[in-house]
């Protein structure tokens, strides 16, 4: 692809190279291969990929983590980028479509079968922002209680979303009112993550948290931390070190037309777009900690559920520390000039039975020196322990055994968009999935010498996504980088552990705030 001088300057200013941009265009042209799932990971007997917990293993792993955590640096990583617009999608549509002069609210809801809207209106007083909206109306001399039922809903939603009022839809999700306590205290998701981190991610009474945010929201997050810091530290006895980062411009990807030509904007410049949460592997790679917890910004609970949720965070971390200790021990074995047959067997058994790694059929034909190379290559990787929840119809990726082009199988988190749903065999494998991914990870990102891995060395660049978008009414194709917990961690060692549904409480729509884990 040939570029103009202005194009080359634009590429340079973004921190990209011509080679990178051309390789992105080639991906559009060639298409991205579907993931080949060999089977769903399950908790059935044998090496089927998901560890099932019992009371003994829960107690053992939480105790192990509590006894060893102060020997390690710990950090909590929270992707928190972007505005909360999608939370209020059905309410934006309501504002656009409803005309109280033409029909009653009940008629509008029933005619259009608007269950989301009906639930929102019924639950209105249970939302944490209810009083905030009423206060805003009062400041504008609008007596909410004197309005008709039709107008009440319209005024309430308009106050929530209007850019001149509370403007919730353009606010970062992490700073929206999420929970209301009996003390009348209103907490945000950002604040809940601090209370949560104090319970399992603090070392010597200090908790480190890192949030990836939109740069334009940096001041708002800093102001919120300043506002709540003293009270949270008083309540928890823990001090907090908070840091922020933004999605790097160098992770933006070129947009193309449906003819795979660079999509040009009205001023002639090429359009580049943020490349999805997969770009955050760069942010994660810049952090230095022995143990990193990863959890989405909207997956929080009110205080009475935090102890139960914390227990399973500690279980995952305890499993990580145990496996890492053994893996490091075996790496030291492999540094020796000669390894005994018993040591080979011990390492092989560990890989298969505890790390869920399927050893190549060719391995047992190798000479000892090649066996050592093979075992080193399998062990010398970052480790992630991922909580998996029983599938109850929630959207999201799931745990699968994936087969590469050489026939090797590994455990991966796979989104349905990565699977060829026109292939009956693949579709059947997808339907066998018993669990889904709640984004509940504990990661070990250092090797046995204490050196940090370069996490970008473990990305499967072919596990990207091509999506259709529009810009100013014109169709285009966009490229999203391999997802943070999908392709960006494809070559990590992966352990799946079944955890209960209480660990998964995302707020995808505003009505999710009416569910029990978000209510007092």
Image (cartoon, grey):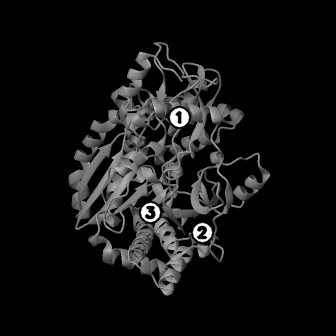
Q: Which residue is label 1 attached to?
A: 23
Callout 2: helix, strand or loop? Answer: loop
Upstream in the sequence, badge 3 or badge 2? 2
Asked whether disc 1 touches disc 2, contact meaning CB atoms under 8 Å apart, the reply is no
Residue positioned 50% across, 66% down in the render? 378
Check contact, mark 3 vs mark 1: CB within 8 A: no
Q: Name the residue under label 2.
A: 49
From the viewer's side, name the closer residue of 321 and 194.
Answer: 321
Rendered view: 351 above or below 156: below
- Mark 1 or mark 2: whose residue is earlier in sequence: 1
Against 310, residue 463 (above or below) is: above
Counting from the top left corner in percent of width and height, residue 334 is at 42, 75
Per the image, label 3 sits on a secondary structure element best described as loop
Q: Position of residue 426 (x, y in %)?
A: 73, 54
- The secondary element bearing badge 1 is classed as helix
Give the number of the disc on residue 381.
3
Give the left or right position of residue 334, taking residue 424 as reference. left
Occupied quadrant, residue 237: bottom left
Q: Where is residue 430 in the image (x, y as percent from the top left)?
A: 70, 56
Q: Nearer the viewer, residue 271 or 333?
A: 333
Whether residue 507 is visible to the viewer of this picture, yes or no, is yes
Does 98 sit above or below residue 4? below
Q: Whole-percent x and y of residue 432?
A: 71, 61
Q: How crowded is mark 2: few (under 14 residues within 10 Å), some or many (20 or more)?
A: many
Q: How far apart are marks 3 and 2 (CA)?
A: 18 Å
Query: Which of the 4 image quadrants contains residue 66?
Result: bottom left
């Amino acid at each position: 692809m040939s570029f103009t001088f202005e194009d080359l300057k634009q590429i340079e200013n973004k921190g990209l190279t011509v080679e990178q941009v051309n390789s992105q265009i080639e991906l559009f042209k060639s298409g991205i291969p579907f993931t080949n799932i060999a089977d769903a990971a399950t908790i059935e007997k044998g090496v089927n990929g998901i560890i099932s917990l019992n009371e003994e293993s829960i107690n053992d792993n939480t105790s192990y983590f509590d006894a060893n955590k102060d020997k390690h640096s710990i950090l909590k990583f929270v992707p928190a980028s972007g505005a909360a617009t999608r939370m209020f999608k059905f309410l934006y549509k309501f504002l656009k479509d409803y005309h109280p002069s033409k029909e009653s609210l009940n008629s509008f809801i029933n005619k259009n079968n608007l269950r989301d809207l009906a639930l929102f209106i019924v639950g209105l007083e249970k939302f944490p922002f209810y009083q905030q909206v009423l206060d805003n109306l009062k400041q504008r001399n609008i007596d909410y209680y004197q309005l008709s039922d039709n107008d009440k809903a319209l005024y309430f939603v308009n106050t929530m979303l209007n850019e001149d009022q509370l403007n919730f839809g353009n606010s970062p999700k992490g700073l929206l009112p999420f929970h209301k306590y009996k003390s009348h205290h209103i907490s945000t998701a950002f604040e809940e993550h601090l209370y949560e981190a104090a319970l399992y991610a603090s070392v010597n009474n200090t908790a480190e948290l890192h949030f990836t945010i939109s740069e334009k929201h940096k001041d708002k997050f800093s102001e919120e931390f300043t506002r709540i810091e003293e009270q949270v530290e008083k309540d928890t006895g823990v001090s907090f070190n908070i840091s922020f980062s933004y999605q790097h411009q160098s992770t933006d990807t070129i947009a193309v037309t449906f003819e795979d030509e660079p999509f040009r904007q009205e001023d002639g410049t090429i359009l580049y777009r943020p490349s999805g949460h997969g770009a955050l592997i760069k942010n994660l790679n810049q952090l230095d900690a022995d143990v990193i917890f990863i959890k989405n910004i909207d997956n929080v609970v009110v205080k009475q559920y935090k102890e139960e949720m914390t227990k399973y965070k500690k279980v995952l971390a305890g499993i990580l520390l145990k496996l890492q200790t053994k893996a490091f021990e075996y790496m030291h074995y492999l540094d020796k000039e000669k390894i005994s047959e018993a040591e080979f067997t011990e390492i092989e058994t560990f890989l298969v039975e505890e790390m869920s790694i399927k050893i190549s059929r060719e391995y047992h034909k190798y000479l000892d020196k090649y066996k050592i190379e093979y075992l080193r290559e399998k062990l010398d990787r970052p480790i992630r322990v991922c909580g998996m929840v029983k599938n109850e119809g929630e959207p999201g990726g799931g745990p699968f055994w994936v087969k590469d082009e050489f026939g090797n199988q590994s455990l991966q988190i796979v989104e349905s968009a990565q699977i060829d749903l026109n292939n009956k065999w693949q579709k059947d494998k997808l339907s066998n999935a018993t669990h889904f991914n709640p984004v509940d990870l504990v990661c070990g990102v250092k090797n046995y010498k204490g050196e940090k891995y370069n996490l970008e060395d473990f990305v499967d660049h072919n596990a990207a996504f091509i999506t259709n978008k529009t810009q100013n009414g014109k169709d285009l194709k966009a490229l999203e980088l391999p997802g943070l917990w999908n392709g960006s961690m494809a070559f990590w060692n992966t352990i799946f552990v079944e955890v209960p549904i209480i660990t998964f409480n995302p707020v995808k729509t505003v009505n999710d705030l009416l569910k029990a884990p978000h209510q007092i």
